[in-house]
Every structure is written in structure tokens, then in C-alpha cells.
Image: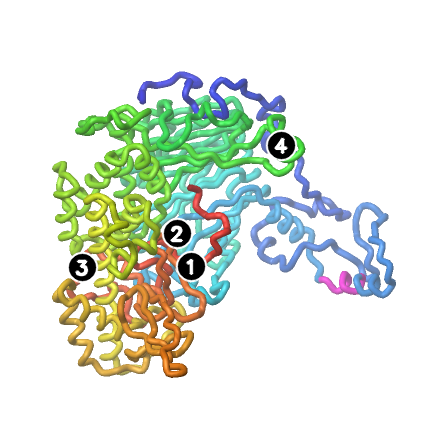
Amino acid sequence: MSNEQVSDHPADSVSGKERKRRRVNTSGIRNFGLETSCDQTPCYKDSKDVNAGSSPSSEAKGQGPCKVLSTKSGRQIGKSSHQTVPAIKSKGKFAKKMHEICSLPLITADQYASHSAMLSSLVVAWSPMLKLSSDMCLVPENNSSNWFSLLAVGAKSGKISFWRIHAPEYYSIEQSGAPTAVELIGILQVHNSWVTAISWALLASDSSNPQVLLATGSSDGSVRIWIGHGEELLKSFEVNNAPFYLLNEIININAVPVSVLSLMPSQSLHKILLAVGKGSGAFEVWIGDISVKKFNRAGSYDAHDQVVTGLAWAFDGCFLYSCSQDNFVRSWSLRGSSLTEVAIPSSSPGLRSVSDLPDVFISCLGLVVSPSNLAVAMVRSFDVNQLDHMYEARLQKAAVEFFWIGGQQKDILSNTSLGFDIEGFPGFSEKELVYWESNILWSLKQYEHWDKPLVVWDIIAALLAFKQSASHYVDHVLVKWLSLSLVDSHVEHSIEMILPHVCKSFSKAASRQLHLLNIICRRVLLSEMKADEINSNLLNLGGLGEADFTQDKQHNLWMELLSSSERELRERLVGLSFSAYKSIASNTASCSPEPGQWYPHGIPQMEQWVAHHNCDVHEQLKVLASEIRTCKRTDCIEREAEEQCTYCSAPVPFDSPEFSFCKGLESNGGIGQKHKLARCAVSMQVCPTTPLWLCKCCHRWTSNLAPETHFMMPQYSIDFRLSPQSSPVKEVSKPLCPFCGILLQRFQPEFLLSALPV
């Protein structure tokens, strides 16, 4: 791949087909933002009372849906004396309907106009998740969570309404909807014309009072930056006073409307990157310093022939991707304050070349970068002239196209050699493979922060694609990742040498690192086996016999690594449960579980598990288990060691933490049928017959959720204390798999389409 600057339209820019004649909209961009609204002005006699830009107070006062003023006789007040009455056969129904209309509350013209403006929304955008420390601010009056997100809704009136959506108080698989607080916290006049673009960015996410930046663009060409503080956003209830303050007006009013914005915090402290897409096909890049409230324009680029429909930053602002209605997507590299166009990598692991794709697309409607920054998803509309008018043209309007960007040169690498022969990697140069390795390692590093959601489908898809033709390359990348993250070694080692050292370092590894390792082992390295087969093999309870298990030695090494990693995570979960039980037992005050609060369950089963693995567990856990036996019993937590079958009420012995067989009931002198019962992945208790949580990665069932502290642990704890901000009574439970760290789901039938894009 070349890193040279490309002048206008490079030959390898992604389009429906490189040599296709581009279709140009004859109306051009001059019509952008000027089309007539379908919302008509209400027919009041005095049209001067109608003001689309009414004050926020008028928007707050209006209650209920917008209705036209009516008299007692039911006649509408308007410019025309004629009225259209729907034909109703029954006279009684007509009278009843007219009576309902007469009983509706009346609203003023300003209220009608403000309601109409709010309904005329043009753009919406979600803010990043905000979390405030309980030490900085008290719990809100409505007992909602300190976790919340903001929804900004831009309207034609130039105003933005802000809605605060709190994280659910608790997560339940049995109830369809847990209570969620949604509140309107303010309406802000951001522009004097239509709001056409909104973009959010989070500053100081690790602080107790995070700040958010809001970039707004308008059809009058202006762009403004606003700032809000997390504590004020949590406490705000004044609709007329939105807690956002103008930081800077980047672009003044001009003739070219703004079509899209992309805001990105830079790697440097207090630095911010802003890309502004225009209706003319050009875009601008601005670099700002929040501490001094100053923004400098890095450059303006005539990138496209039609309106820019998408802008997205990748790799912490090192790359910018733009797309347009001209059916082109382009890649740009930012070095310092200079932006240059670079070629998009033509080689794609596991995919056909772009020239083999069908020639049915006519324009690009938008794009977004994947969570790990290894792929870009682009929405492209179909050319109806290229579709079958009988079938395809009626149903197919647009499609989502994925293409890889993991081969981009993000950094100037000192070593561009892999250290082994690359003849087995068709279609890839040695430099491209080095760039892929560097970007995959960078992506894996980003997920070591526990507050980043563990969504790694693009990493898994890329590794699986490489594994099909270059399995040794995948082993090379993963061994290097394990050496850097767990062993802290920069020396190249073989798999046989490095994996035993990795197992010994698990006690010093963060829970997030172990979760990431388990996902990669199951979905990539052991992908030829089903999840149930892997679980059975780990327990040595049936599964595959030696005659069927013909994998090589490396395969067995990865299996042993997965077994050690999951045992480490289970020890941490058991230790947290024992510690919480001790704390609750020593508390003289009465305790009662509340929705959303974590309580330790399955203490007898955990004691039996520690006894069965007495030779493998840490000494700290053995000591804690012995202390549990001397604790007084508490009414808050059950301690019945004997379990019963949910189908026949027969006793169920504890054979394994995954599943057990009941003993069966005696009938007619014999033993009845024995039932195989799944155990909860968290408590190791027999799962009830009620709906359960399911992990799509390891296929384990969960009836009791794990505590949040389990996913935040930086290493193996000596005393297994909970997080400093919580106590056993206030510890929050999260719907995450304790072994994979991903979101749990409700079980879905196999015939339904998968929610994953790959």
C-alpha cells in the first residue's frame, strides 16, 4: 500500500465500480435545505401570532397533542369558511365524535407553532454514556441511576431539545421492560435556521464529573461548539435553561449549508478534532484547544462533486473517511495539522475485490467506523435502473456495505518485517501484514479499559478471515499480544514457550484481559468446535474422546489456556461471593434484596467447588472458604446445600459447575428417568424453569447476575473486597457473562436471523 498523496479521485477509491460513469444530480446542491416543508402553517386568522422560532417557554407550556382550535359548535377556525367532515353513517357516532372534539383543551397559536417545530425534527444524535461518581452528586430525586445518556433532537426552528435517558435501575429477563427514566432537561436555541447536523464528544471520561462537547451545524452554514458538565446535566430539570454553554462559533453564516459533522477528542490533552461536511461536496477540518477556547482551521478540501453525506474519524483521529452522494468514499490521513488523501487498502482478508461487486449502487448515504476501527460500514442506495423492476426495485432501497481498513498505515513503524516467510499469504504484501498486525494490537489494547463495551465482532471477523488462508499469521499476532499484555515481554517466542508463562501470570491480569482472551480462544482458535463441545472438553465429562480429538499439540495448548483463564475468573467470582456473605453475616441490621442489587447466591455450591478443586485454587480462597463455615447464618441468603430437580423433585448432587443429573425418583421398584439440569454460570445453582440469560459466546445459562466489581478487577484480589464506592447491599449487578464479559441475551430460536453483521 502506498502512502503517497493522491490528487483528485484516486484509482483505488471505493465506489460501486471504479470505472463507472458517476451520475450527477442535475438539481445540484443548491436545493439542499431549501425544499418546502410538509408541515403547513396553522390556519389562524391572525398569521402574525404564528412564530416558528417561539421561545422555549412556549414549548414547555404546551401539554398534549397539537389540536386545531374549535368552537362549541365544532366548527374549525381558519381562513376558509369551508370545512371537510368525514362521512359517518351513524348519526350517533358523529355526535359522539363531535362531543369528544369539543371537550379537547384549547392551545394558543404559539403553543401550536412550538409543538409543530418539535415535530419537525431533522436530525438526532446520542451522547456517549455519562457516569457520575456517587461521592460527587447525590442520587437523583426519582431514584434513577447516575448512568445516563443524552438524546439531542434538532428541529427546523433552530432549536435542540435534550432528553436524558437513565440506565435501567435493574435488568430482568422475566420482565419485558425494566423501569427507565426519560426526562426533557432543556431546549436550546442553537441556530437561527434549520439544525442539519449534530455530533457529540466526551472529555475526561475517567473523572468524577465528565464534560461533553456538542457540535451543531445549520442550513445557514454556521457551526458552533457547546460544552456541558455532567453534574449539571444530571440535575437539570429547567426546560427553559438547557445546561449547555457556547464555547465557540467555528464558522459564521454563509451560503453553503452544513450537511454532516464529526467530533473526535485528540490524543493530546484538551485537543479536539472537528470535520465539517458541506452541501457543496467540500469539507473542512478544524483543530481546537478546549483550555483556551481556540480553534484553527487545518484546511478545506473539495473532496466530492455532490453533498457530503458522511464523515468518520478512525484510530484516534489519525484517519478521516468521507462519503458523498457521488458514490465515492475517500480516506484521509492527518499528520500534525496537515490532511492528505491516501489510498484505501485494496486487499481484504476473506473478501472478494471491489471490482467483483455488483454494479447496482448509485450513491453513498452515510458511513460509520466499527468499534475496533478495523472496518467501515457504508449505507449505499441502489440504482433502480439496474434492479429487476418486478421484484427487487419494490423491496430493495439500500444496503450496508462493509470494507476493511485494518491495512492502513497508522504509525511509522521502525520494523516492517514479520520475521517469517509470507509466501502462504496470497494477495498481501509484507508491509500490509505488518500494518494489520499493528492495528489489531492497537484495537486489542483499547479494550483493556473496563468501561469500554466489549464489542469485538470486527476483530473476530478479521482474525477468522486470516485464519482461513494464513493460520500461522493469526498465531503470530495473538502470541505477540499475549507477550505484551500478560507476560510483558517484547521478545518473539513460540507458542509452546509463551503459553505456559501466560497461564502463570493470570493472577496479575485484569478481568477484562481474561474476558478478551476467552472470546478469542472460543471464536477464533477453537472455532471448529461448538461451544457445548468446548465446555464438555474443559470438564472432561464426556465430550470428544481421544479417538475423535485429533487436533495438534497447539490446539491442546489453547484449550489448556482457556481452562486456566476460566478457572481464574471463577475463583474471583467465588471470592467476591464469600467476601460479601461475610460482610452481610456480620451486619446486625436486617437486609432485604432489592431489584438491581447484587446478593451472593449459591454459597453451598461454591464451597463444594472449592473443595473439589482444593489443589488448584489460591490459598487466599481456601482461607476465605474456611471462614465462611464459621459465619452465622443469615436469613437474607439461603444456605441449603441439598438441591431438587425442577422436573421430578429428586435430589441433585453437585457434580460440576456446568450441569448435573438428578438421582431420579423410585417408581415400581426401579429408578425413574434422570434429568440433565444446567447450572447457573454465576451461582452454580440449578437453573430454574423461568426464562434465563444466555451468553452467545460460551453458551452458558445464567439466572443470577454477577456483580459489577467482578468485571473491574485489575488482578487477583487478596481480600476480595468490593469496589470502594459500593457495599454488599448496594453492589450493582450487570447483565454480562462472567467468563466472556459480553452482554447476555434472551434465548432466541435458531431460525431467526443473527443480529451480528458477520
Q: Earlier in the sequence, mark 1 or mark 4?
A: 4
Closer to the camera, 59 or 298? Answer: 298
The residue that disc 2 covers is 129
Amino acid type of the residue that numbered disc 3 sits on in the rendered structure: Tyr
Q: Is residue 103 magenta?
A: yes
The residue that disc 1 covers is 167
Callout 1 secondary element: loop
The residue that disc 4 covers is 34
Quadrant that contains the N terminus: top left
Q: Earlier in the sequence, mark 3 or mark 1?
A: 1
Q: Earlier in the sequence, mark 3 or mark 4?
A: 4
Callout 2 secondary element: loop
Which image quadrant is residue 94 in? Answer: bottom right
Q: What's the CA distance linking mark 2 and mark 1?
A: 9 Å
Q: Earlier in the sequence, mark 2 or mark 1?
A: 2
Callout 3 secondary element: loop
The label nearer to you, 1 versus 4, is 1
The label nearer to you, 2 versus 4, is 2
Q: What's the CA distance linking mark 2 and mark 4?
A: 35 Å
Q: Is residue 279 visible?
A: no
